[in-house]
């Protein structure tokens, strides 16, 4: 298929504009260089080798992953300095130990003393240390020990003092930037997360502990605040692809979004004033339900159309208002969906079709599972 | 892992109780035998060879699929008499032709004259005929030509009269049974779809056309009405697994559901009265949002818990009311999710772990893509 136009693809198909990915990645690299912090890109959105190479500038070093399957996949392909940024799951301690003993630098994360006990029980061979990040909740409200709780400092100290375990850093994910609208709100959350993290680093210093610090999320790292320069690292991920959600938040423009789902018209339903397309929830994620006036996606070049509902292999499309002009949408014609959430939509596809300027270059194959 | 308990699995993991699958399949086979109609089971829920063998009684004949990838996968493994029950997509006509020329009986479906034109343009080799089902909309409101429109009869006649093309049957999917609650409502929709289909068959007969007829959906075929005996075939699919949705509709009891997603507690959040589990929307589908008092799933044995929200790899669980007793849910402990929609949740997994009475037997690997 190399060199062929996108229209040569069977649909539905996830397509990636490699030039946009490179531009998004390069901008993030430059932003972090300017800020003077280490970029540790997150792989969870795409889970491919090719995109990891672009995001790491081909160094294959210093990445963060959301699953142990990703960690193993990247380790198997020569990546190192991998942070598995997920509260260390007790069923996977042995697999984490194996990676710790095999790589130069495999890092885990925890937020509870019971997890530290698990690591203590599994001493690493050859005098190796567990490299542990403390997950801090600075207002995101998901995983992490609350920054304001005395237990947070206590747990950091316990990690630092445990034999065979090293406190590598403090990690805060500001996923609460996803509730923001516009740069000002994003920067308010970024500042808050940064300040709370830096305050925690001061508390650590006061008890004689120094280690790294990292915050992240695509919105905050797309519009960093000055104080983020005082952190050691940042760990955004979605920015390689971006998506409609990020454009609504204000992280990027719709123009920056590097992924699309191609779909074709497969049905005319004049009695319902609807079209059917060959993309259902097996081709584009249900994530984002009710959040866009255009439904589950933006239909590129057709702002008056709405992806109203989906079943496994069908999408129902209707005009936001007025009658549908079916002559514009003959059966078999292509439509292009810009996904609301690229992480969730990429996950529905076993291959991504990569193009430059609408000419196919090849395929990227993501890893899956846990 | 063979012979080990389910707790040996890393989580999240999709597990299939093979005894329940066999029982569900056997009941459907017997129900159809009793009714005297041919069962053509749909593969879209599981997309595996093993489950297809169970559903076809190992005949590897007479199945229906939702994607051409499924059709090819089953054809490659010795299945035949395959109906690709999807408005024939114009980008896949050549692939459909190849299957038609290769299998004893590959069947397609259409609901528009333009699709018939596509088939006409691609004559099959060796004097073979396109085997075409007409998709009829009997109130479901998705694909299909409306039963009440004069175009429906006209299209059936056009198919029957086109050289190189044969009208194999009339196909109606009563997906509108998914809005039902209880057997009575299911049977009302089943009766309506059956009656409208049979009336259409009469109209065809009046113009000298005879062919097969098929209706289907798991609710209607779990509680068939007598008149369905006058149809040639039925085509349910979800019943092999069933799910919470089917139990809410009244197709089955919760006891009949053959699939679960195993997950583990990975976080305690007493300040929010929540638990975190290691199953997000990458492990269980977002389909069913807002439909259950217990959130995105039923948590087996814990009817007072709700799967409130999910991100990619995290689920937030909280009590429906009152404070959470964390001593009952230590970090690392297993919880079992019964999915709202098994078709959508199975799609999130690259392997299914099959067990009998909680002892692992092996893995089933589904096909994916289009």
Image (cartoon, coloured by chain):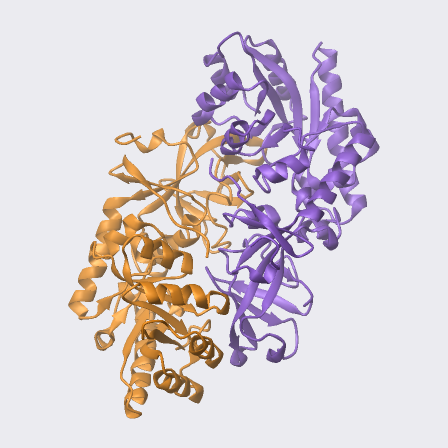
Chain colours: A purple, B orange
- x, y percentage for residue A45? 60, 42
- x, y percentage for residue A232? 74, 24
* Residue at x 57%, y 39% (from the top left corner): A48
Instruction: Work out whether A283 lies above or below A330.
Output: above
Position of residue B41 in the picture relative to residue A316 (left or right) = left
Instruction: Work out whether B255 lies above or below B184.
Output: above
Q: Residue furthest front?
A: B126
- x, y percentage for residue A145? 61, 26
Q: Residue furthest bottom?
A: B206
Residue B226 lies in quadrant: bottom left
Please give the count of numbered marks on the rendered protein: 0
Closer-to-camera residue (A200/A241): A241
Determine if residue A340 is in view: no
Determine if residue B236 is in view: yes
Q: Residue furthest left?
A: B34
Closer-to-camera residue (B16/B103): B103
- x, y percentage for residue A363? 56, 47
Instruction: Work out whether A23 lies above or below A107.
Output: below
Residue A329 lies in quadrant: bottom right
Residue B211 lies in quadrant: bottom left
Quadrant showing the N terminus of chain A: bottom right
Instruction: Work out whether A182 lies above or below B246.
Output: above
* Residue at x 71%, y 15% (from the top left corner): A204
């Amino acid at each position: 298929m190399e060199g062929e136009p996108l229209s040569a693809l069977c649909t539905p198909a996830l397509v990636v504009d490699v030039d946009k990915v490179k531009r998004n990645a390069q901008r993030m690299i430059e932003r972090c260089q300017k800020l003077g912090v280490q970029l540790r890109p997150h792989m969870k959105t795409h889970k491919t080798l090719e995109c990891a190479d672009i995001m790491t500038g081909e160094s294959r070093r210093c990445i963060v992953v959301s699953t142990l399957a990703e960690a193993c996949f990247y380790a198997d392909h020569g990546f190192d300095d991998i942070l598995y940024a997920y509260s260390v799951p007790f069923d996977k301690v042995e697999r984490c130990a194996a990676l710790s003993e095999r790589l130069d630098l495999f890092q885990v994360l925890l937020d509870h003393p019971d997890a530290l006990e698990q690591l203590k029980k599994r001493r690493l061979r050859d005098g190796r240390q567990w490299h542990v990040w403390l997950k801090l909740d600075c207002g995101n409200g998901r995983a992490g020990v609350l920054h304001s709780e005395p237990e947070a400092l206590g747990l950091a100290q316990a990690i630092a003092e445990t034999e065979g375990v090293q406190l590598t850093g403090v990690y805060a994910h500001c996923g609460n930037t996803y509730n923001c609208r516009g740069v000002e709100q994003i920067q308010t959350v970024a500042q808050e997360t940064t300040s709370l993290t830096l305050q925690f680093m001061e508390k650590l210093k006061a008890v004689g502990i120094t280690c790294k610090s990292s915050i992240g999320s695509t919105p905050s790292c797309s519009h960093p605040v000055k104080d983020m320069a005082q952190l050691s690292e940042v760990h955004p991920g979605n920015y390689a692809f971006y998506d409609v959600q990020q454009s609504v938040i204000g992280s990027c423009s719709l123009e920056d979004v590097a992924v699309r789902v191609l779909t074709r018209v497969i049905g005319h339903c004049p009695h319902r004033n609807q079209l059917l397309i060959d993309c259902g929830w097996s081709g584009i994620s249900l994530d984002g339900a009710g959040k866009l006036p255009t439904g589950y996606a933006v239909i590129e070049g057709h702002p008056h159309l709405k992806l109203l509902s989906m079943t496994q292999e069908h999408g129902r499309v209707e005009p936001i208002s007025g009658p549908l002009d079916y002559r514009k949408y003959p059966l078999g014609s292509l439509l292009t969906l810009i996904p609301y959430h690229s992480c969730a939509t990429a996950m529905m596809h076993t291959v991504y079709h990569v193009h430059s300027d609408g000419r196919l270059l090849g395929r990227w194959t993501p890893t899956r599972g846990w």
